[in-house]
Image (cartoon, rainbow, N blue to C red):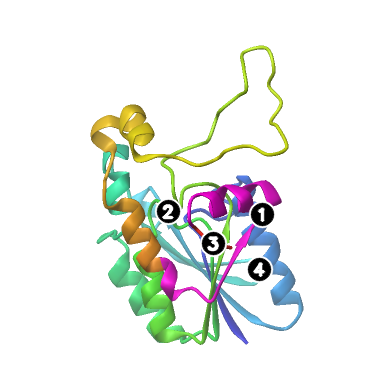
Amino acid sequence: MKILILSDGFPPNHIGGAEIIAFNLAKDLKEKGHEIFIITTTQKKNQEIEKEYFGLKIYQIYSNYHERWRAYLSLYNPQTISYIEKIIKEIRPDVIHAHNIHKYISYHSLRISKKYSKSVFLTVHDVMLFHYGKLVEFVNQNDLSVPKNFNYKIRPWQQIKRFKKRYNPFRNIIIKHYLKYIDKIFAVSHTLKDALNQNNKKM
C-alpha cells in the first residue's frame, strides 16, 4: 500500500515523543513492504526540501508564524494547505495517518486527505483537539498525584481566562467538523482517551 504520514515535526529535525512515534511507525511499515511518504514542516525557509531518510520519502514544507495566531492558523494554514493538496493528489495514497497537525499542517489537511485517499486515521498525542496547551491540574499543592477518576472537562470560560485574546470561540467547533473526515481516532494512552471523551471527542 501507499501510506502517507502527516506530522508537523519529524526526525531528524524534530525528536519529541510524537515525532519518534511517527518515525518508528513509518520505519516498521516500510520494513513490511509498504511505500511510505511523509509530509512534515520546517520553520527555516532554506530547509524546504524533498529528501529521503531511512528509505522514507519526506516532503518538508516551510511554515512559520507567531504563536498568537495558532488558534486560527492551526485550523487552516494558507502557508501549507495548497502544497499539501498538491502532494496528496500526486501520490494518491491508500491510507493517510495524521499525528500532530495542530500547528503548521493544520486540521484542514484532514478534509483534503479524505478527498484523495481511501482511509484517514488520526493518532492523538495530546489534548490539542479541545484545549490550547498542556493540562496541568493538581488536587492540591502538596499532592501531585492524579486521582483515578479525574475531571478533565474544560469549560470555555477557563480557556478565556487563561488564553485571553488568543482564545478563538469557533476553534473547537471547527475542529469537531474536521474530525468527521477521519475513519478512526487513536489515543496514545487511556488517560488521554478519557480526557478526549469528557470533552466530547468520542473515541
Q: Residues within 10 Å of mark 2 (few under 14, many from 20)?
A: many
Using the numbered discs, state the Cα–Cα distance from disc 4 to disc 3 in whole angstroms: 26 Å
Where on the picture, by quarter, is residue 105? bottom left
- Give the numbered dot on residue 26: 4
Q: Which residue is mark 2?
A: 102
Q: Which residue is mark 3?
A: 202
Q: Which mark is residue 188?
A: 1
Q: Is residue 199 magenta?
A: yes
The nearer-to-camera label among 4 and 3 is 3
Q: Residues within 10 Å of mark 4 (few under 14, many from 20)?
A: many
Q: Nearer the viewer, mark 4 or mark 2?
A: 2
Q: Tell me which residue sits at (49%, 50%) in the image.
A: 199
- Local crowd at mark 3 within 10 Å, few (<14), some, or many (≥20)? few
Q: Secondary structure at mark 2?
A: loop
Name the residue located 27 percent from the left edge and 50 percent from the top edge: 72
* Disc number for residue 69: none
